[in-house]
Image (spheres, rainbow, N blue to C red):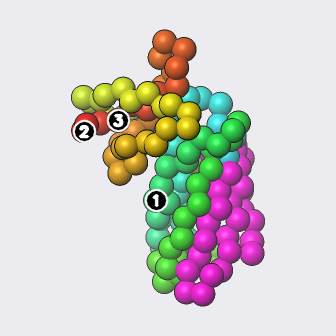
Amino acid sequence: MKSYEIMYDNNVVGSAVVITEGLYYKFVCQCVLYEPDMYRVYVADENTTLDLGVCMPTGNQFSLTKRIPQKKLKGEKIRFCIRRSDKSVGQNIVPIQEGQPFEYMDKLENARVEIRDNAVCLVISGI
């Protein structure tokens, strides 16, 4: 198990723990982000950059847990960064209700968080 810093705009915003599970790596990422937006975590080695997915709000942090095959990262030095997701045109607002299932998990790739009318919402393209 190794721990790495997660960078955003040349600042450390969190940590990523990498756990070897057989032929897979398990990434457990925790970030503190202060702007209401959708962020994606990336891991890179000397040759490859992989999109691990969207950080989800958990309390006062954002987190992401992901497993990938070890063969996708072959380099010796890995690093993590976080970037804002691309904002697309033609978006819809989806309210997030605590304790309710979220119907649009498969569409989060093009989503971002916004605060509208004192409510936290996801802006999702293509729904």
* Dot 1: element: strand
Tell me which residue sits at (46%, 70%) in the image. Answer: 48
Query: Disc 3 to disc 2, how far (Cα)?
Result: 7 Å
Residue 41 location (% of width, % of height):
54, 53
Q: Is residue 2 shown above or below 99? A: below
Q: Earlier in the sequence, mark 1 or mark 2?
A: 1
- Dot 3 and dot 2 residues touching (CB under 8 Å): yes
- Residue 67, disc: none
Local crowd size for mark 3, using a 10 Å CA cut-off: few (<14), some (14–19), many (≥20): many
Residue 9 part of the magenta segment: yes
Which SS class for mark 2?
Answer: loop
Label 1: which residue? 51
So how many labels did they put on this image?
Answer: 3
Q: Secondary structure at mark 3?
A: strand
- Seen from the viewer's position, the closer of residues 59 and 99 is 99
Residue receiving disc 2: 126
Please, what is the three-letter code of the amino acid marked with disc 1? Asp
Residue at figure coordinates x 49%, y 38% from the top left: 100
For marks 3 and 1, give the CA distance: 18 Å
Q: Which residues are magenta?
A: 1-30
Given the image, on which type of amino acid does mark 3 rest?
Ile
Q: Nearer the viewer, residue 3 or 67?
A: 67
Alpha carbon separation for disc pair 1 and 2: 20 Å
Amino acid at pointer 2: Gly
Tell me what residue is drawn at x 56 percent, y 33 percent: 98
Image coords of residue 99 (percent x, y): 55, 38
